[in-house]
Image (cartoon, grey):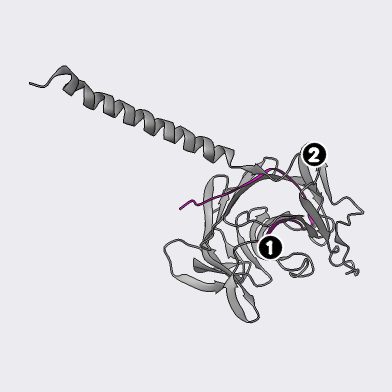
Amino acid sequence: MKSRIQILLPIIFIGLMLSCTNGTKEKLEEKETSEWTSLFNGRDLTGWDTFLSYQPDTGDTSIIGVNKDPEGIFSVVNGTIRISGKIWGALTSVDEFDNFHLRFQFKWGEKKWPPRDQKKRDSGILYYCVGPHGAQSDHWMRSHESQVQEGDCGDYHSLDGALIDIEATEVKLDDEVNLKYTPGTKTIVGVHQRVLKSETNEKPNTEWNTMEVIAKKNGDITHIVNGKVVFKASNSRQTVNQQEVPLLKGKIQFQSEGAEVFYRNIEIKQTDLP
């Protein structure tokens, strides 16, 4: 017959294991939360540079340049970043980032400007931004884009020839053939064009939307809109001196592209998420 101590020992051991497991879980959850770093202090644009090109279709294509903003295109209003959209360009992070998880919130303003005053409100989050300002159409750096546009949030765009591989199918939109992210289908290699998200998950224009970008050191990228994954791709790269090389680190840009938009709660952390 087992002694009382022999009976109690397994129970005590299991209790200790559960206690350690719960403690470890709590510590991991605390670490996960604490790793987020704010990229916007809510007061000013510390940590960011401005770049402005010009307002298209006005006849004046003179580049305004870096940290020159005579019309206040970029400003801080009630704890948010306001981008008026009148002149095209971007708010650009001073720092570069790799292997990151970025999240932020945006909401549309009311103003729209030519030549997009009769079109969808448009902005965008550009990441892995490298090279000179204005490399893409005089306005933005070479980069990947998670589209911020009415009805199209989470779409992918390649700027200045950034490349990805993606599971996609061909679809017709506005009488043009586009690609659409379609998990489980054939992988298309070397994509450098617009790719439609898998589905729409936006809120009404008057509400705040949460968007996320996960860009991993193995070249995988993911776009998330209000908690739903709407786009994934792999093998982030670029062409340099006619050779394809990895594109795994760069700055972040928020576009000014013809529409008033507000951004807040911009946070980032390094990640090794599977």
* Residue lying furthest top: 4
Q: Dot 1: few (<14), some (14–19), or many (≥20) neighbours within 10 Å? A: many
List x then y, in percent, for residue 173. Answer: 60, 66
Return the disc, 2 or 1, that comes first in the chain's sequence. Answer: 2
Residue found at x 67% / y 53%: 150
Q: Magenta-highlighted stretch: main secondary structure?
A: strand
* Residue lying furthest bottom: 242
Label 2: which residue?
A: 43
Label 1: which residue?
A: 129
* Residue lying furthest left: 1
Numbered label attached to residue 200: none
Q: Quadrant of residue 33?
A: top right
Q: Where is the N terminus found, in terms of image quarters?
A: top left
List x then y, in percent, for residue 240. Answer: 65, 77
The magenta region covers 250-274
Secondary element under disc 1, as helix, strand or loop, is strand
Q: Nearer the viewer, residue 54 or 234?
A: 234
List x then y, in percent, for residue 206. Answer: 70, 41
| Residue 204 visible in rendering | no
